[in-house]
Amino acid sequence: MSEGEQMVRANGDERFRSVAQLDMLHSLAAKLNALGNVAEIGEAITAELRTIIDYHNCRVYLLEPDGVTLMPVAFRGDLFHEYEEETLEQLITKVGDGMTGHVAATGESVLTPNAQEVEFAVQIEGTDDIVESMLLVPMKLGDQVTGVIVLSSLGYGKFDEEDQRLLEVLASHAAVAFENATLLQAERRAAETSAALLRLSQALTRMHSVGDILQEALETIPSLAPCAVAGVYVLDPSTGTFRLGRLHEVVEGSARPRAEIADVPGEISDAFLRTDTEPFVLQADLVRSLPRELYLAVHPAEVLVAPIRWDPDGSGVFVMVAPDDSRAYGPEEIRMARGLADITSLALGNARRLTELERFHELVESLDAVFWEADATTLAFTFLGGRAEELLGPSATGWPLEGRPWGSHIDPRDRGEAMGAMREAAASGSDHSLEYRMFTPEGEYLWIRDLVHVVAGAQGVRQLRGLMVDVTERKRAEQALRESERQYSEAFRREREAAQRLRALDEMKNTFLEAVSHDLRTPLTSILGSALTLERTRMELPRDDAVDLVHRIAANARKLERLLSDLLDLDRLQRGIISPQRRPTQLETLVRRGVEETENPSGHAIEVQVEPAVVSIDAAKVERILENLVSNAIRHTPAETRIWVRARAQDGGMLLVVEDEGPGVPADLHQAIFEPFRQAPGSESMHSPGVGVGLSLVLRFAQLHGGRAWVEDRPGGGAVFTVFLPAG
């Protein structure tokens, strides 16, 4: 046969092979789409692909949800002696590792006649160094890589580009089939999980014992998630310890003896219990770091923890131990655990509430009261017990069936207010206490105290509960007491007022004596001493000494006269027998004269700033105001400090300001220093009479003009006393 004839025959054979391969490929694609299980699809690919492409080893990898792990789902080959030591852990790879990981990372196919020539190839540990052709094709949905199909064959160049094109077409069909099967399996598992949780919920609703509920939930766990051992711990709130309540061995021989398993102390549970509401996973390495006496399983592995809580203060956790290290708990198992915990928590809460309610009803029946329940929206009674028939009448027990609302039994005089209070309690969700009148079937009116408790749930207020207590005798006693108090209250009031006036007078007397005793004694002592000196010397003193003594007598006499004047003016002002004598007055003349006539024994520098103006004021009273303010500044500031006096017309009246550089006035005394016989602590001089009276007169004289007086802190230190006198 000629070379040309051989080429024609070869081309014909190639076309025949291509057509056969395409037919087989279409048949395989249809078969894959009909399958609904990932494992079955993988097996079909490895089996049927053998009829299209000759290989000795085929692997199908799927990318796990973590986006990193490539998990083998199918494996087929003839020459197993080269791979007889391979394990699942060795076949598992990651994106970016080796040739399979490279294809997953790049999304590009790899065709090589010899894998040893590929720089990113990784040889499986323990296998021989052999020449091996390889073809690796990514499975993709759009641009997203979902897995890799790997073919290998012993020898050099066993695959060609036609094989690559066929495998790429098959890979696209396989990606869709795997995705559909994954979704279908997820839906199937979700349906099975939902059915199991529904059966659990139905079973738990019939149980009223905490132990029975926990045991039923434990026995349901294996149908929801793979585990070797399952247990439930209950928190002891007094110690913070989690005590093992139930233990369920799923795989025979996997659980440690119950007696050897210790409770989990608070210091360990606090470190590992990441949340008390959401399920979480403890990795196997972390579990192995715990003390061995805490292990549930003989061989510790990854643990899924699902917290549970129930009213009012119950708390615990479900613990599921994975069957082995190769099994990890993912999002699907965590969602299942959340559903299991929610259903169990609800059942435990309902059981606890039902038990408490039964005990409460038993207690109510023994009380001398009426216990009731009503709908929070309509207020219709749903239950009446206790003394209902005795207080409300024989028909009261039928009120719940009639739909009779709470409030219909209340006297019309109190009904509106009581209904409003009840509506407010239901709206706010807060408990309430009511008192109202009602009539018995015999026509006797009673006083009832109704203690209302609002029962709230996750969806808001669900129910109202109350306790009606007959307080008629107490009300009658209170009414009799009020009548007695009305008869004697006026006499008691007059007696209290008289006692208060006597106490006020006594306090005023003590304050007065304390305030003026020193100020009277000091000038009198000076006058008496000077006079006795003159008397003993029969006036035979040097003229200058005699004149000095006379000046001292005159000065101290003026101090006494000023003190007595202040006291008399204060008394007249308090009795309201002084009125201002307003006259047009030159403000500048008045202020400068007042400052000049004020005694300044320490020689303070006083600066006066007055805007010329004519104001209508009682000049004598204003001069007393100015004198007392300046004297107060001199008395309470060091000699080397300055004093400023400013005055101007304002709003038809006048404004007077006296500032100093002294220690200032404490904030808590800003008002108290204007009270009679009060003075700021730390006075620089205690020798001037009138201390404790002058500022009180300043305020009273200002109020006499319809004005006011106040003190403020001066920026930089000191005090600012201000008096405003409005127009008359």
Image: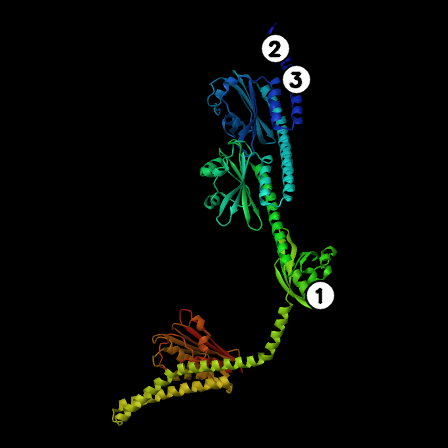
| Residue 113 visible here | no
The quarter of the picture where the C terminus appears is: bottom right
| Residue 545 visible here | yes
Q: How many marks?
A: 3
Percent of width and height locating residue 404: 73, 58
Residue depicted at 62% across the width and 50% down the height: 354
Looking at the image, tell me whether mark 2 or mark 1 is earlier in sequence order.
2
Q: Which residue is mark 3?
A: 19
Graded by Cα atoms within 10 Å as few (under 14), some (14 to 19) or many (20 or more), the crowding at tag 2 reads: few
* Mark 3: amino acid: Val
- Disc 2, disc 1: CB below 8 Å? no
- State the image quarter where residue 434 is shown: bottom right
Front residue of 365 and 252 = 365
**Residue 66 sits above or below residue 2 on the image:** below
Percent of width and height locating residue 326: 52, 31
Relative placement, left or right, of 135 versus 630 is: right
Percent of width and height locating residue 630: 41, 79
State the CA–CA distance, disc 3 to disc 2.
18 Å
Q: Secondary structure at mark 3?
A: helix
Mark 3 vs mark 2: in front: 3
The quarter of the picture where the N terminus appears is: top right
* Mark 1: amino acid: Thr
* Mark 2: amino acid: Met
Relative placement, left or right, of 141 versus 549 is: right
Q: Which residue is mark 1?
A: 440
Graded by Cα atoms within 10 Å as few (under 14), some (14 to 19) or many (20 or more), the crowding at tag 3 reads: few
- Disc 1, disc 3: CB below 8 Å? no
Looking at the image, tell me whether mark 3 or mark 2 is earlier in sequence order.
2
Q: Which mark is residue 7?
A: 2
State the CA–CA distance, disc 2 to disc 1.
118 Å
- State the image quarter where residue 672 is shown: bottom left
Percent of width and height locating residue 629: 42, 79
